[in-house]
Amino acid sequence: MTGRDGMVESLIYTKPVSLTERATHYCPGCTHGISHRLVAEVIDEMGRRETTIGVAPVGCSVFAYDYFNMDFAEAAHGRAPAMATGLKRVSPDRLVFTYQGDGDLASIGAAEILHAAGRGENITVIFINNAIYGMTGGQMAPTTLPGQKTTSTPSGRDIEMHGFPLKMCEILSQMDGAAYIVRRSLHDVAHIRKAKKAIRQAFEVQEQGIGFSMVELLSSCPTNWGISAQEALTWVEEHMVPAFPLGDYKVHASINAGKKG
Amino acid sequence: MGKELLKGNIAFAEAAIRAGCEAYFGYPITPQTEALEHMSRRMPELGRVFLQAESEIAAINMVYGAACAGVRVMTSSSSPGVSLMMEGLSYIAGSEVPVVLVNIMRGGPGLGNIAPSQGDYNQIVKGGGHGDYKPIVLAPATIQELIDLTFEAFDLAEKYRTIVVVLADGSIGQMMEPAELPPMQPVRAFDGRPEWALTGAVDRTPNVVSSIYIDPVEEEIFNLKLVEKQKQIEAEQVRSHKLWMDDAEIAVIAFGTAGRIAQTAVRDARSQGLNVGLLRPISLYPYPYDSVREVAEQVQRILVVEMNGGQMLDDVRLAVEGRVGVDFYGRMGGVVPLPDEVYEQIQKTYAQRANGR
């Protein structure tokens, strides 16, 4: 392709077909856009856009179905794993995934995610952990760090009063039914690339019928953290990663066995 | 097929299977658990989906998911469990997917007990969950009617894309009587799922099933659509059973098990020369207001009998509009009235029939 100045251009970066043309409603600097794109790229690469059904949560990503170019359901708060269970059980050859925030998954939906993992429900969960309630304006989440200021912990999360954050990868990795439970971060390019590989692995686990898969993505919320987009990414690296260590918490034996080389 | 001796809970579960129910999600709760147990055995042997959920909250959301996929799906529960389902039912109503629910009511409020009750009338008939919606509510009085209404419920749910609740009580769930099951219907093929269903966007634009309309004007338009649908349901699906009304000077109005007990009492009263008739509403939504009104124009006084504190009573009064006096007799908390008690009340109402309101 020839550009305006006569230079030859080659197209190296396009929008995944699995994303729509809808302009984002997410705040500047929010990492939801990155998560959406990674999921969409993986579904594109697997050739599964037409045979994937997503389930959106309640939270900032309640409108995820506006961005994903595929069949989508919008669940009640926290119930996405149950809804996905219903969808998957009657359409077992479809890829079914939920996209859930920390309030949705780890607080109001704690029972649903625990039992979906326990059953080894053959679904994939994309878990966005930004340690705060975004949509309602920055209240304490089940993953809010000790000492972290939110609009409902104005002096910082006091562990004497509010207890400790829930670490969902650590918890769910104890489930016999869980096949692939990993935590990644979106705070820089290298980590984003690792996150994409994990998302691909999680969907492949489902495609192969191995069991429940979840990728937790440490994410930023500059608006409700009250800092700039760049500071927010640094905050993820400096505060969230130590509290929520990255890594593979559960990898089913048959996944490693299938690895090349 | 012929009649066989069937327990209510097993009868409605099997009727659902015969109607082509492809998936059942539930949670054990007395007095409906035999339905879940029957499904746990029958659904897998037919290659269909059975799943015992971790809670009624999860069960109704699994139902919601399967309904979004366009299959015939149901759950069943009893009063406290149905309370837990109210969130999901509101979402289901808000996204217009067809779902069948059987509520085998028990005594309440709270944990209450496991005895028969009609205490959930207001909760179920008036909507139950948040927002403006009404499910179709059908109230059987016999095992045969329980079978027939459950079987038909799947057609109605799909015809109107609505929730259909079969509202019965612990006595209907637990008792056995001879009844005939319908022939087996096949489940729908994957390719035959509705065009709105979430089946994967193969060669079409994506489908979204959602109950969110962030713009109030759009939400109102959706609500008005539900209202229009309700008008259609009200025009097409009103059901009631009238007995001995031709010469009736007073009428007893009762639904479900209370209607069946009242029928025995009314029969006894007629054998003693009292001109009493019976109206038994079968559809509680849409409610047979016109039939109640006709009754009120004919008789001198009405007796409402319920196994609650007087919940359908409000709907009777709405239809009667003060034309005649309305007496009420109710037993609550899981106590089932005896025909003799109702007979005594009939005598009282009959004696006061000339005394106006």
Image (cartoon, rainbow, N blue to C red):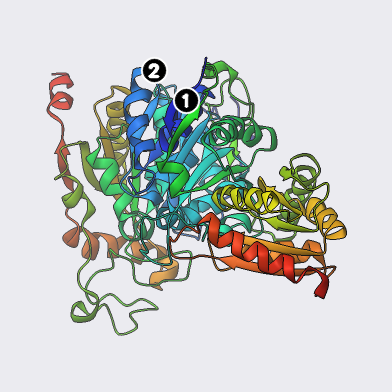
The residue beneath circle 1 is B17
Please state if B322 lies on the left or on the right of A124 as rendered. Answer: right
Label for residue B206? none
The residue beneath circle 2 is B46
- Disc 2 chain ID: B
Which residue extends farthest right? B297
Q: Which image quadrant: the N terminus of chain A?
A: top right
- Asked if disc 1 and disc 2 are in contact, CB closer than 8 Å, the reply is yes
Taking depth in this image into account, of B159 and A177 the one nearest to the observer is B159
Taking depth in this image into account, of B138 and A62 the one nearest to the observer is B138
Taking depth in this image into account, of A103 and B184 the one nearest to the observer is B184
Residue type, mark 1 in image: Ile
Please report whichever mark, 1 or 2, sits nearer to the chain's N-terminal start: 1
Where in the figure is residue A187, as x and y percent of width and height? 31, 54
Where in the figure is residue A97, as x and y percent of width and height? 40, 37
In the rendered image, the vertical position of residue B143 relative to residue A172, given as above or below: above
Which residue extends farthest front? B272
Residue B211 shows in this picture: no
Residue type, mark 2 in image: Leu
